[in-house]
Each structure stands twice: as C-alpha cells, then as structure tokens.
Amino acid sequence: MAVPFKTKKTALTFRKQPMVTAGIAILLATGLIAAKLSQRIHMPSVTGYIIAGLLLGPSGFNLISEGSIGNSLDHFTRIALMLIAFGIGEHIELKKLKEHARSLLFVAFFETTCAFLLVTTTVFILITYTSLGIESWQLRENLALAILLGAVSVATAPAATLLVVRELNAKGPLTSSLLAIVAIDNGLAIAIFGLAISLTHQIIGQDGTPILMAIGSGFLEIFLSLLLGWITGFCLEVILEKLKKEGEMLTAGLAILLLCSELAVYLNLSPLLAGMVAGFTLVNKAERDVRVFRVLNNFEPPIYVLFFTLAGTHLDIKTLGSAGLIGLAYFLARIVGKIIGVQIGAQLSQAPDVIRKYLGLSLVPQAGVAIGLIFLISADQSLAVYSSIITPVVLTGVFLSELVGPLAAKFAVISANETMAPESNGKDEPRCEGLTEKECHQFMRSEAGVKILPWTWRKLTPPDNPESVVVFGATRRHTVNGIARIATIFAHYFKARPMAVFVRPPDTVTAENHFQVEREEVESMGYELLTEVVPDVSIASGLVAAVEYNDARAVVLSYPLHDEASDFSNILETVAGNVSCPVIVVQFYGVLHTEKILVPITDMEDLAEVYPVVAALDTVGEHQIQLLCLLSSEADQSDLDLQTEKIRTWLNKQPGLVKLSVKSVATDSRVDTIKEEAEGHDIVVMGAIRAHGVRKFFFGSLTDSIAKTLKKPLIVVYDAKKNK
C-alpha cells in the first residue's frame, strides 16, 4: 500500500506546480495591462498593480488566493523587499544631503512621532467610545491595539515612492529629501515597532522584561541590522570590482543581497534596514561604483509587478466589516499626522519651502514594510487576538494609501517642478515639467514642442557664380524655417542657392507672402531665396518636376510632426525614386541644435552616403562630430581597432578634411546603442540603412526604428542614384 500512496502524492504535487506557474503568468500579465491602462489616465503604474491584485483576489475573480497558490510566491515578496531597500540606499548620498541633514532629522522625527501619536489616539478613542470595539475588552486591550497600529503607521512604502520617482525621472531637493526621509522612516518604524511590542507585552501582562531592557533590545536589533548592511555593502564592493561583465555582476549582486536578507531573517534582524545600509555603503564610497544598481534595475520590473499585484490580492473587501471603518480612520489619521509632522519639523529646522509644502503628501504611500510588520505581529502567539483585527485594518489602510499615495506623490513631485525629460541636455528650459516620459515625447514632436531658434552664427558668403540649387519643400509651414536653414547650409556646401518649392492644386492661388518665413530665415544666414510655385495635383510629382527642371544638387524634405496626418511615405517614395540627386529628410524634435552631431554607420557604404551631409554641416559654426561605427556583438577589440583604422584611412583621402572623432562599438542592439549615444548629442545624422529599395528608406529599416523612437532631431540622407 505504500507504493500507491507515494505515487498519488507525487501526482498531486505535480498538478500543483502548474497552478503556481499559471498564477505567476496571470499576475504578470494582468499587472502589466493594468499599469498600461493606469498610465493612459495619468495614474502611476503601482496603482494599476494594486487594482489588478484586487481584481484577481478574493474581492474580484478569486483567481489568486491562498487556496490556489498557498504561500508559493512569498519568496518573490522577500526578493522585492530587498531590492527595494537596496535601491533606496542608492539615493541616500551624504554629499548631496549634507547641507539638509539638520532639516531631515527634524522632519523625520516629527512626522513619525505625529503619525504614531495621532493614529494611536484616534484608534483608541474610536474603539473605546463607539460600537466598533470589542465589548469584552477593557481599556488596556484597547490601548495595546492602538499602540500597535500607531507603530505600524510610521512606515512608508519605499517601493511605491521609488517607482513614482523613477517614472517621472524626478530630481531635486524634494526628491532627495523624500527618498532619505523614506529610508529614515522605515528605520524609525522598525525601532518604534520593537518598542511598541515590548510596551504592549507590559500592558497586557505577558512579559516580565523590564521596559528599559525591552528598549535596549530594540536598539540592539537596529544596530545589528546596520552592521549586517555595512558588511553586505563591503562584500559587494570587494567582489564587484573584480567583475566586468553585467551578467556576472547581476548574479553576484543578487546572491549577496538575498543572502543578506535570509541571514537577517534568521537572526531576527531587519532585512529592509540591512538592504538600505548596503546600498548606502556602496554609493558613499570614494570609488562610487554604482554598476550593480544599474544591472539590478533590469531585473526588478517583473519582481515589482508580482510584489504589488500580490499585495492587492491580500485584501478581501467582503470580510472587512467594522475593521474596514477603523482602517479608514487609520488611513486618514496617518496622513494628517505625516503632514502636520512635516510642517512642524520643517518650520523648526527652517527647511526649504518646497519640503514644507509637498513632503507630507509624498509620504502617503504605505505597503511592503507595513505588511511585513503585521506578519510579525501575527507570528507572536500572545498577540494573536490583536492580529485578527490589525491585519484587515492595516490592509485597508495600505489599499487606500496605495491607490491615493502614488497619485499624491506624483502631484507633489510635479508641483515642486522636479520632473525632467530623460534626454534633457540642460541647454533649454524644462519644457516637459509635469509630463510623463511618453507625454513629453509626444509634446516634443508636436507643433507646440518643436522650436527653431534664430540663427546666431556669422552670416555665410554666397558663391559668385552659383552652380545649381538645393530645393526644399515649403509645405509644412510650422517647420519651414528649419528646413530653409538646413537647405541653405547644404546650398552653401554645394556652392548653390536655396530654392523653396510650393506645390499647389492648379485651381488655387498662392498668397503673396507665402514664402515670407523662409525668406527671412535664408536672408538672416546671408543668402537670397529663390522660390517656385508648381501647380500640380500631386505634391510628389510637383517636387520631382521642380528638382529635375532646375538640376538640383539635393532636395530637403521635412518628416511630418507627431500630430500631423500625412501621406509622407508615398511622397518620399515617389520623390526618391524619380530624382537623380540625394534626398535629405529632416525630423524635428524639440529645440533644434547642431553643435554636437552623432553619425551612426554600419559599414563603409553608409559612410560614403552620409559624408557629404556631415561635411556640409561642418562648414558652418563650431561642431563636435562623432562617427559611431556599429559592429556585431561578436566583434572583439582587434576587430574594433581594425575598423576604426579603416575609417580614418578613408577619411584622410577625402577633400576638405572634416574634424571628427571615430568610435567603433560591438552591440547587441543597434537601436539602443544609437539612442544611448544620442543622449549626449544635439542631432543625429545617418544614411538610409536599409534592406532593399526605397521602401526600406524609412519603413522596415533601422532608420524607421530610429525615427519612431529617437528623442533628438534627425537628418537622414538617401542617395537615390544607388538604387537606379
């Protein structure tokens, strides 16, 4: 009988595993979809994760519950908490916070103290003088419950706060102070919680330990957690300096951090506090090697989705009852306490106004640490009766704070003007304040976002006997001055004259001042503008006729803005397929600058195609030009050196040597490499790196991918003669 029983048990175990795998898949997919929907209505991603968990849990479709997956996913929560704590530590850089250290300590002390006192008082009064309490309880039970809830209320959610900060790419005094306060908050929360547990045991008569000894034990736990974190940070530094590959750093870093987490749990210490100190230790070292933070960032997203979505599944609205009303009071009292405490601390320490006004709202989120603390209460047998009430109360507060908190934090950061466009180069005003990365990208490609600054370089000297013209389309009125500028630069290089061509239907009349904007732009550069109106039902055929009739050296077109509807692909295909000169396409993005130019190529053919455009740009003003040669990821250093030398040899043979630097790189992703390099440049110039024919000029090519996602102005050159 033993064998059949063993076989049956094995079968049951086998059937349970796919349910866990399916649970992970459902959590990830639903969390991601909910986050995307939240972003579309301008809500933080973390709010979407919580709502997704609520829908998947007992309050929704009940797809994810303890009955279906048990505690099989708990290890993801522990991994997430350690990564969250480590990430918070990165933002506690002493050099940056030194000047605000006094105000931070004051603010942290008062906001934690006020939250603890206000929540404790509110809950005690509510359960003592209303029908929400338990009838058989005396004042000491009510006080014990209130103290425990007050201690839990001190904690702030580092993960939600960190995700909002990363999503907005926020930087500034409020952001730095916020992340430091969150770290201090959770350190104080652990200390206060330890003291509250000891005090509660004293109140209910379950512990004979003197109160001073209990307090000392709490401080010893904090000290040992700090020590463990410092040792972890030291080990990370020693090991990581010997590793070069990102995969090795990810593996080693994750192993050390998870070992720290498990050791902290085994020793009854705080893994959160240890993780924060590990990150703090690394970022404050003189060497400041932060590579491990970057590689871990790539590992975090699915863990975060699981963590927050699972948090949402823990709340069962149907079973809340009176605990839900206490949870609402807990939630409101905690927020008020945080805001009042920040006001007092900021006033006494004379902190900047931005901290006094907005820091309190930023501290609304509460999740991981608070959930961890209620699990500690439930593990204490003497406090089991309180745990049955504290768990739904805190989870109610956590649910509300994770819905409202990220929105409050986002509002505070935006109101403090600390959001930044990721690719901001510091030259222009922060034109994306208050916008998400996606909204900023759309804005910078719209008529409102594109900006052509006046010409400030010296005027150009036209040739005495111009040989030809450079034609540019004068259809897109919002960017026509930018196109006129680029066309004039090319005309100057080719010893030609710029010509604006406007194609109109045969039965319409052109306004007398139609060419006024482009004429003023060209004249400000020292040239005179030629104009030509072509009556034609087709813009493409009209442009081709003007280019061929005038024997143009080049034709310049403007790629449509983000908010324009256009048949541009067909126009481009027709023009490029029927003219005998290069076609140059300009895509505008934000403010047009050309001082720092990036030129990505994949082979020598691309270089020959794009070189005339680079040489033309180099003839006016002062430029820094970097030629970026993209080789396959298998290329070793000798291959890179050989390619660089080959390019330099070719450049030395060209007339009118262009001053530029050459960089050859091995890459797994051409698009990502170009975008990363472009962050330090003003404009990207590239040839039409394509597979076959004109259809691959913009569509289905590397150029197409770059044009869709690049957050810089882009110039693409297509030499039509190569496809003849």
Image (tube, grey):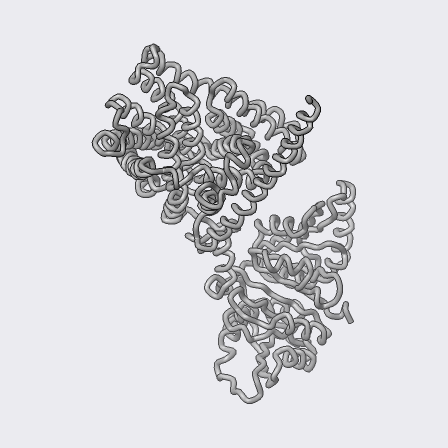
Q: In this view of the protein, can residue 153 be seen by the observer?
A: yes
Residue at 50% across, 48% down? 35
Residue at 70% across, 67% down? 695
Q: Nearer the viewer, residue 642 or 357?
A: 357
Residue at 21% across, 31% down? 129
Q: Nearer the viewer, residue 171 or 620?
A: 171
Q: Is residue 501 above or below residue 291?
A: below
Tell me residue 368's x, y (percent).
45, 33
Q: Nearer the viewer, residue 24 or 501?
A: 24
Tell me residue 605's x, y (percent).
76, 59
Tell me residue 543's x, y (percent).
64, 78
Image quadrant in which you'd find residue 699: bottom right
Q: Nearer the viewer, residue 342 or 15?
A: 15
Question: How many discs mark residues in the rendered view?
Answer: 0
Residue at 63% across, 81% down? 542
Residue 435 shown left or right of residue 632 in the figure: left
Q: Is residue 172 above or below residue 270?
A: below
What is the quadrant of the N terminus in the image?
top right
Tell me residue 278's x, y (percent).
51, 26
Image quadrant in which you'd find residue 153: top left
What is the quadrant of the C terminus in the image?
bottom right
Q: Is residue 594 above or below residue 722?
A: above
Residue 30 shown left or right of residue 657 in the figure: left
Residue located farthest toward the bottom when viewing the structure as drawn: 507
Q: In this view of the protein, can residue 491 be seen by the observer?
A: no
Residue located farthest toward the front when viewing the structure as drawn: 1
Residue located farthest toward the left when viewing the structure as drawn: 129
